[in-house]
């Protein structure tokens, strides 16, 4: 459970089905400590079960996303201490959330912050945002998916350059290599992420969740197996009321009202 300290992750659920999860630890540029990770996991586990939430925006605010892990928490830790923390279970609450998650990144997304953004399904970055996996400069390596998610996103040669040198990648370059979804003006990062989330939230949630599940699960399967997975999910959706509503709205030339049923 999170500590009894002042909450460092804030949640706002809007009327349009969009939830905003905001890390608020600005005095240390939102550095990830145990409390942040635990509160993030608690929020995402709860949001996964809420039918009134259809899309999630994860942000650190207007100035910075997450400038890395809180080094004070692990500088002198032993391997067994790191093992017993089992932080992978906290990260999984985000990566396994069935709702689409959009990272709105301003400023720095370094180390654990870069990994946190890559746990999301879309990344909208401000034009001055910076991304890096600088763990090698501390005698370490990424430990929350930074090597594996990065190589899947941008390919071997760019991922190797980023992880082996710890270099800083500017948002336009990150977009060009396939690391991001969009780059916008800094003051439009959160508004654009909210706009995308609202667009997704207005669509049939069962179809949205199936698309996410199949794309993520199929990415590491042989093509033929992934196509079977896609086909079965496609067929399953024909049993949903939303599919019938969508077809009826199309023929009647009106806006569909999707209930997630």
Image (cartoon, helix red, strand yellow):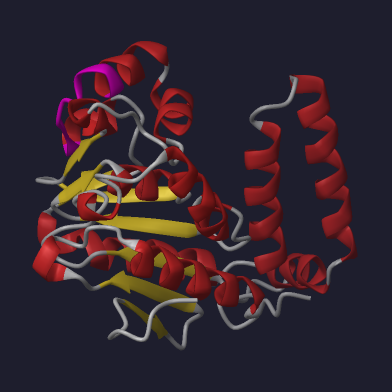
Within the magenta stretch, is there residue 1?
no
**In the image, residue 97 lies at what x, y percent?**
59, 60
Residue 170 quadrant: top left
- Residue at screen point 35% across, 56% down: 103
- The answer to whether 25 appears left or right of 205 in the picture is left
**In the image, residue 105 lies at what x, y percent?**
24, 54
- The answer to whether 17 appears left or right of 206 in the picture is left
- The answer to whether 235 appears left or right of 156 in the picture is right
Q: Observer-nearest residue: 76 or 246? A: 76
Q: Observer-nearest residue: 120 or 44? A: 44
Q: Is residue 28 above or below residue 43?
A: above
Within the magenta stretch, is there residue 170?
yes
Magenta stretch: give its range. 163-171
The answer to whether residue 250 shows anywhere in this view is: no
- Residue at screen point 72% across, 64% down: 206
> In which quadrant of the rendered image does the C terminus lie?
bottom right
**In the image, residue 143 lies at what x, y percent?**
41, 37
Residue 3 quadrant: bottom left
Q: Observer-nearest residue: 149 or 233? A: 149
Count the numbered circles shown.
0
- The answer to whether 188 appears left or right of 122 in the picture is left
Q: Is residue 81 above or below residue 63?
A: above
- Residue at screen point 21% across, 54% down: 72
The answer to whether residue 112 shows anywhere in this view is: yes
Residue 229 quadrant: top right
Residue furthest to the top: 157
**In the image, residue 181 lies at what x, y percent?**
36, 42
């Amino acid at each position: 459970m999170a500590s009894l300290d002042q909450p460092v992750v804030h949640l706002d659920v809007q009327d349009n089905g969009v939830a905003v999860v905001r890390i608020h630890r600005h005095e240390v540029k939102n550095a990830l400590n145990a409390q942040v990770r635990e509160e993030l996991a608690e929020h995402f586990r709860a949001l996964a079960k809420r039918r009134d939430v259809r899309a999630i925006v994860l942000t650190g605010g207007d100035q910075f996303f997450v400038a890395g892990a809180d080094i004070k928490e692990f500088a002198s830790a032993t391997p067994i201490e790191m093992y017993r923390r089992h932080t992978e279970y906290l990260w999984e609450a985000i990566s396994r959330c069935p709702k689409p998650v959009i990272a709105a990144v301003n400023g720095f997304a370094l180390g654990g912050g870069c990994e946190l953004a890559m746990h999301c399904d879309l990344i909208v970055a401000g034009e001055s945002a910076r991304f890096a996996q600088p763990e090698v400069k501390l005698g370490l390596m990424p430990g929350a998916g930074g090597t594996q998610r990065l190589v899947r996103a941008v390919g071997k040669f760019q991922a190797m350059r980023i992880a082996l040198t710890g270099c800083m990648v500017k948002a336009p370059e990150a977009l060009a290599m396939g690391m991001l979804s969009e780059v916008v003006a800094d003051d439009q990062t959160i508004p654009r992420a909210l706009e995308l989330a609202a667009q997704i939230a207005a669509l049939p949630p069962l179809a949205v969740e199936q698309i996410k599940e199949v794309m993520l699960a199929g990415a590491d399967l042989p093509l033929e197996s992934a196509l079977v997975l896609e086909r079965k999910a496609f067929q399953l959706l024909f049993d949903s009321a939303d599919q019938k509503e969508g077809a009826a709205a199309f023929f009647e030339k009106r806006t569909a009202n999707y209930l997630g049923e």
